[in-house]
Each structure stands twice: as structure tokens, then as C-alpha cells.
Image: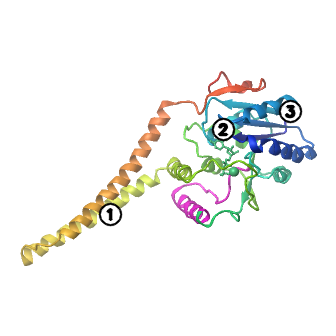
Amino acid sequence: MVQMSIVVPCYNESEVLGAFHDALVAALEPIGSAFEICYVDDGSRDATMAIIKDLAAADPRVRYTSFSRNFGKESAMLAGLRMSRGAAVVLMDADLQHPPEFIPRMLELHQHGYDQVVAQRDRANEGVLRTALCRAYYRLVRRCMNVEVVNGAGDFRLLSRRAVDSLLALPENNRFSKGLFSWIGFDTVSFTYENVQRAAGKSKWSGRHLLNYGIDGLISFNSRPLRLAIHTGLWLFLSALVYALWIIANVLLDGVDTPGYATLITAVVALSGIQLATLGVIGEYVGRIYDESKRRPHYVVRETDETATVLGPGLS
Ligand code: UDP
Ligand code: MG
């Protein structure tokens, strides 16, 4: 019986993976419980897969799945959760930004009855702009979503078996884990650690990546942005109506007034801006519906170690 699974999504991590694995095993062995490490190779184009296979050959506690191409971290985490068999599952990054030393503490909190233990990083070593943007984003998210998403709470967390099972039972294709973790509920506890820099290699999240991820998060959770668009549209329409009445009254009282070009242009521009934004929001939802209706799998598996039978024949 495996007591603990460590799920690690890896994309082009050959520079750090060896060091990460050593640090992880060094942190896990003193705990003395049976563990497995589930590496998910997210279509890496460097030596990541070769390193994982070497690790698996040397240690039966190492299991792996690799994707046919890069499907993104969300899909990799999903595959890892699906292959995990432990009574507790820890999700963490391969770049040593999630220090393995905290795992014993997470396990201890789990043993005190918590289903989710979140290790939250502070944003000490990050750029000022990035920190400010993240803070603003989380404020917006909290306002728009029905679920609580915590600033700085990345994906470094421990989940109990029943929490993992409830996550896996969610059918949606567009997965925004930060929201899903909070949606499933259960007793959650978090602690903060000092942010560490990536040990080697570079971050896969460019500004554009982050912006898209942010939009995903906002849209995939509920229809509040859509409702906001409708409200704005209605209020604008009402104020335009009032303005029109005022103009008509003016014309009736004082006769025709020539200027007004500026007002017109302003109104046209403002309104078309709002319309475009609204259309964008609607399009986003329609796209989501289209995506969900295709029922495509989240990823395509290239290969797995022989223990990973749960994954089924290639697709899942
Ligand atoms: N990752 C992944 N697929 C991707 C991008 C990233 O599996 O398409 C993994 C990556 O290997 C790492 C984790 O997700 O283990 C976090 O990525 P990264 O360190 O680039 O993100 P950051 O820490 O900068 O947010
Ligand atoms: Mg990182």
C-alpha cells in the first residue's frame, strides 16, 4: 500500500531534475512511509524523459507517464493525479521552487485531519511589477468567482485521497486547478514559506502565457463576467436614452443646435468599445461550450511505466 504519492509535472527540466530528485528522496526517506514519485513528462524536447527513465530503472518507487506533445501543466497535473495511488498526494514543481523539505510538515498537518495542505509562497523575490499585477489579479478573481483563490498559493499542496478523487470526478475539459481545489472544499490549512528562485533552467510562463492563464481562470469559473457585460450594456443604453431625451427637449425648446460632433464621436467610440468587449466575453463562453462539446481528452500518452495501467489505452 502506497501511503504517499508525489506528482511532478516536468517540461524541459533536464537541468534541474537530477538535483530535484535527490532532494526529494532525501526529504521523503526519513519520514519512513511507503511513497511513490509520479513524473509526468509534458512533451519535453530535451533530455527530461531520458533522465526520468534512468531514475525509474534505478528505483521502483519512480513511475512515469509521458505525453505525445506539450499539453500544458494543467493536463500534466491531471495525468499525475490519475496515476497516483497514495493515500495522500503531494503536487509540486520540478524546479526546486517548491522545497521538498516542507513535505514532512505537510504530512503532519494532513495527519491532524486536513484534506488539503497548501504551502503558500510569499512574493519576496519577485519583481515589483509582477507582484502588483498578481495582487490586482487575485483581487479581481475573488470578486468575480464564487470560490476563494489565494494570492501566492501555487500548486504546491498535499491532497487527501478523497480530495483527489473528488477532483478527478469533475468532468470539465477546461481545467483551472486553482479554482477547482477551492471548489471541492474539505478542511484546508496553509502555511507560508519564503519564495525561492528556480534552481536552473527557465520559467515557462511568459507575460502572454500568464495573461491567457488569467483570462482562463476568470472565465472558466462562472458566468459573472457575462453578467457584468450585460449590466454595463444596460446602464449605457439607459444613460444614452436619457441623453437623447434631453437633446430632444433642447431642440424643442431652443431649436436645432449644430455642434455635437464631439459628443457623437465619443459616444460611438465608447459604445463600440463596450460592444467589442462584450462580444469578446460572449465569444469566450461560446468557445468554451464548443471545446467542452468536443469531449477531447486532456492529453495523449506516449508511454508509461508498466505499473501505470490505470491510464487506459493511450487516451484518457
Ligand atoms: N510545466 C509543465 N508544462 C508546461 C509548463 C510547465 O509541466 O507546459 C511544469 C514545469 O516543468 C514545472 C512547473 O510546471 O515543474 C512550473 O513551471 P515553471 O517553473 O516554468 O512556472 P513558474 O514557477 O515560473 O510559475
Ligand atoms: Mg517555477
Up-down relation of residue 294 to residue 279 (above or below): above
Up-down relation of residue 191 to residue 256 (above or below): above
Give the quadrant of the C terminus. top right
Q: Is mark 2 within 8 Å of ligand 1?
A: yes
**Whole-percent x and y of residue 113?**
80, 51
Up-down relation of residue 139 to residue 2 (above or below): below
Question: Which residue is labeled 3 in the image?
Answer: 1
Q: Which residues are magenta?
A: 130-156
Residue pushed farthest bottom?
Answer: 254
| Residue 36: quarter of image | top right
**Whole-percent x and y of residue 118?**
73, 54
Q: Residue 76: which disc?
A: 2
Question: Which residue is labeled 1 in the image?
Answer: 235
Element under disc 1:
helix
State the residue at coordinates (66%, 36%).
Answer: 42
**Whole-percent x and y of residue 228?**
41, 58
Q: Residues within 10 Å of mark 1 (few under 14, many from 20)?
A: few
First reached walking from the N terminus: tag 1 or tag 3: 3
Element under disc 2:
helix
Within the magenta stretch, is there residue 149? Answer: yes
Q: Label 1 amino acid? A: Trp
First reached walking from the N terminus: tag 2 or tag 1: 2
**Whole-percent x and y of residue 263?**
22, 69
| Residue 245: quarter of image | bottom left
First reached walking from the N terminus: tag 2 or tag 3: 3
Give the quadrant of the N terminus. top right
State the residue at coordinates (62%, 67%).
Answer: 128
